[in-house]
Image (cartoon, rainbow, N blue to C red):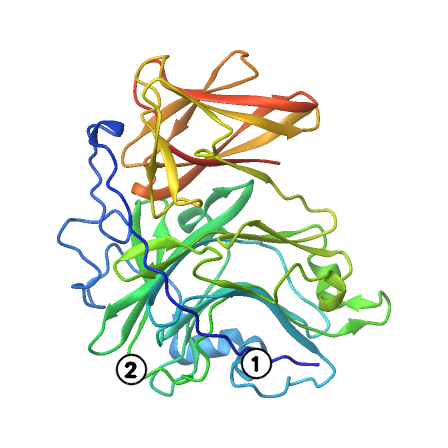
C-alpha cells in the first residue's frame, strides 16, 4: 500500500511587500533583509556564503554518526523518496501536505511543533513535518518520531550522498534553546534557502531563542539527486502497520492525544518571502483526508489557514481557532492601520496600535465556550514592546511582546482570557507606548 511522493510543479506567483510606515514602529533597532530575518544590513542571503553563518552552529551528530543514530528510520525515509517498496511490505506509507512552487521558490520558512517523550512501536515511523524547498534544494528538514525517540534531521539530497547529514535529539537542551511556545505547544522556527547559486549551496537555520539569532543547522552543495521529484512540504507522513489488538496503526496509540502543527509556512518567491496560499501552492491530497485513510480513525486534519497553517491531531488533543488582525469585521481605532507583510499568515498585519488610548485594534465576533481560554497573540516587532488585552470591555491586562526578530518576522506570546458563551470582543492597545504590529490570534 506504499505511496510514492511525486509532486507537481506549480506556476510561481511573485509577491510584493509594501514597506511598513516608519512611525508604526519607531526606534527600530533590528534591521531586516528581504527575506524577513533580522540580520546586519550587509548580511544578504544572496551574497552570503555557506561558511558565514549568522550566529552559531546547532550542536548535533554528522556524517556516519548521524546515519547510525537515525537507524532504520532513515532507511524507511530513503526508500520512500526513491520510490522503492516499503521495507515491510504490509506497511502503509502515505502523506498529507502541500506542493510548493518549483521554478521560483528558492527557500522555505516554517514554524514546526515538537513532541517529546514519543517512541513509536510496531515498526511505525511518523515524519511530521518534513520540509524541502523546490528548485533543486539539497536539504530536507524532518522531525522524525521513531522507536528510539524524537529527532530532527537534515537529509542531504545532493552529490550522491542521499542520507542523513545531521541529526539532533529533541531533548530538554534543544527545547530550551531552539523552541518557543505556539498555541501552547513547543515549536522551532526553520529557515532554509539557497546561499549560493553557483554551487547550488543550501543552508538550513534554526532560530536560537536564547541568543536571538539564526544558528546554522546544515549546509550542502552539489547537483540535486532527485530531479524527477520537486517535492514540497509534508505536514504529516507515516509508515504504519495495523496493530491486531486495536485495528489501527501502532502509531495511533503511540501519539494518542497529541497535536502536530505547522504554521507561518512561507516560500521565497524571487527575493520576497510570501505566505503559502492557494494561489502559489496546492494541497495534496486535495480536500480533507480521513483518519481511516491513515489507519487511524481518531486522526483528524485541519487546514487552519490555507495554505500556511496546518494541524493533525489525534483524539484527546486540541486545536485552536484563529482570527486575522486585518479582517474587515474587526474595528481599528485612531491611527491603527493595515500594512502588507510577507511574514504574516494573511499577508498583512495591523500597526499603529497604542501610543495612546485612541489607537487600538478590536477583534470582533470571537466565539467560544464560556470560561478560560489560552489566547495566542502573533505579532511582529523589531524591539521589546507590550500590549494591553481586554475582553468585552473589561479590565485590561498587560502582555509583554519581546522582539520577534524584525517587522516582518512573526513571533508569539500566550496569555489566558475568559470568554462568555457566544460572541466576544478582544481589544489590543497600549496607553503609554507603541504596541507591536498584530498578525492574528488563536484561542484554544
Query: Residue sitting at 62 percent across and 22 percent down?
Result: 418
Structural distance between the alpha carbons of marks 1 and 2:
22 Å
Residue 363 horizontal/vertical position (percent):
51, 26
Residue designated by label 2? 222
What residue occupies the far right of the structure in this picture? 245
Residue 110: % across, % down: 43, 55
Q: Quadrant of residue 385?
A: top left
In front of the other: 188 or 277: 277
Along the viewing direction, whichever of 213 and 193 lies nearer the viewer: 193
The correct choice, above or below, for 90 with respect to 369 in the image is below
Q: Image point 31% across, 84% down: which residue?
A: 223
* The label number, if any, that marks residue 80 in the structure image: 1
- Please state, as top left, top right, bottom left or bottom right, where the N terminus lies in the image: bottom right
Q: Nearer the viewer, residue 432 or 345?
A: 345
In this view of the protein, can residue 148 be seen by the observer?
Answer: no
* Dot 1 crowding, Cα within 10 Å, few <14, some 14–19, many 20+: many
Q: Residue at x 16, y 64 (%)?
A: 47
Q: Left of 330 or right of it: where is 217?
A: left
Determine the image quadrant of residue 320: top right
Badge 2 element = loop
Residue 173 pos. (x, y %): 45, 52
Residue 205 can be seen, yes or no: yes
Question: Residue 104, which numbered label?
Answer: none
Quarter assignment of residue 428: top left
Amino acid at each position: 500500500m506504499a505511496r510514492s511522493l511525486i509532486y507537481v510543479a506549480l506556476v510561481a506567483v511573485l509577491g510584493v511587500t509594501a514597506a511598513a510606515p516608519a512611525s508604526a514602529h519607531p526606534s527600530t533597532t533590528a534591521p531586516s533583509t528581504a527575506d524577513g530575518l533580522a540580520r546586519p544590513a550587509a548580511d544578504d542571503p544572496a551574497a552570503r556564503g555557506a561558511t558565514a553563518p549568522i550566529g552559531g552552529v546547532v550542536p548535533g551528530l554528522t556524517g556516519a554518526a548521524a546515519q547510525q543514530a537515525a537507524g532504520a528510520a532513515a532507511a524507511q525515509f530513503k526508500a520512500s523518496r526513491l520510490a522503492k517498496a516499503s521495507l515491510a511490505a504490509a506497511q502503509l506509507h502515505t502523506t498529507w501536505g502541500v506542493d510548493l512552487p518549483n521554478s521560483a521558490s528558492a527557500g522555505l520558512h516554517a514554524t514546526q511543533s515538537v513532541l517529546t517523550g514519543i517512541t513509536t512501536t510496531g515498526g511505525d515511523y511518523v515524519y511530521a513535518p518534513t520540509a524541502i524547498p523546490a528548485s533543486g534544494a539539497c536539504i530536507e528538514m524532518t522531525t522524525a518520531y521513531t522507536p528510539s525517540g524524537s529527532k530532527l534531521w537534515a537529509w542531504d539530497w545532493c552529490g550522491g550522498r542521499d542520507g542523513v547529514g545531521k541529526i539532533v535529539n529533541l531533548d530538554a537542551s534543544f527545547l530550551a534553546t531552539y523552541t518557543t511556545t505556539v498555541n501552547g505547544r513547543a515549536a522551532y522556527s526553520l529557515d532554509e534557502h539557497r546561499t549560493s547559486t553557483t554551487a547550488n549551496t543550501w543552508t538550513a537555520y534554526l532560530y536560537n531563542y536564547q541568543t536571538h539569532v539564526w544558528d546554522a543547522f546544515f549546509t550542502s552543495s552539489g547537483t540535486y539527486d532527485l530531479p524527477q521529484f520537486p517535492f514540497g512540504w509534508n505536514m504529516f507522513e507515516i509508515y504504519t502497520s495495523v496493530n491486531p489488538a486495536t485495528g489501527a496503526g501502532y502509531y495511533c496509540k503511540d501519539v494518542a492525544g497529541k497535536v502536530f502543527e505547522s504554521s507561518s509556512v512561507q516560500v521565497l518567491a524571487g527575493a520576497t518571502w510570501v505566505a503559502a496560499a492557494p494561489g502559489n501552492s496546492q494541497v495534496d491530497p486535495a480536500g480533507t483526508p480521513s483518519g481511516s485513510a491513515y489507519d487511524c480513525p481518531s486522526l483528524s486534519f485541519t487546514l487552519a489557514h490555507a495554505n500556511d497553517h496546518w494541524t493533525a491531531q489525534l483524539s484527546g488533543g486540541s486545536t485552536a481557532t484563529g482570527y486575522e488582525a486585518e479582517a474587515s469585521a474587526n474595528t481599528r481605532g485612531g491611527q491603527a492601520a493595515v500594512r502588507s507583510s510577507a511574514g504574516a499568515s494573511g499577508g498583512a498585519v495591523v500597526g499603529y496600535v497604542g501610543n495612546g488610548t485612541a489607537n487600538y485594534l478590536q477583534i470582533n465576533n470571537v466565539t467560544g465556550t464560556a470560561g478560560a481560554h489560552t489566547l495566542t497573540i502573533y505579532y511582529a516587532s523589531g524591539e521589546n514592546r507590550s500590549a494591553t488585552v481586554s475582553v468585552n470591555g473589561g479590565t485590561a491586562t498587560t502582555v509583554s511582546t519581546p522582539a520577534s526578530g524584525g517587522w516582518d518576522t512573526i513571533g508569539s506570546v500566550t496569555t489566558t482570557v475568559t470568554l462568555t458563551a457566544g460572541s466576544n470582543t478582544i481589544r489590543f492597545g497600549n496607553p503609554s507606548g507603541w504596541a507591536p504590529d498584530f498578525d492574528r490570534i488563536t484561542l484554544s
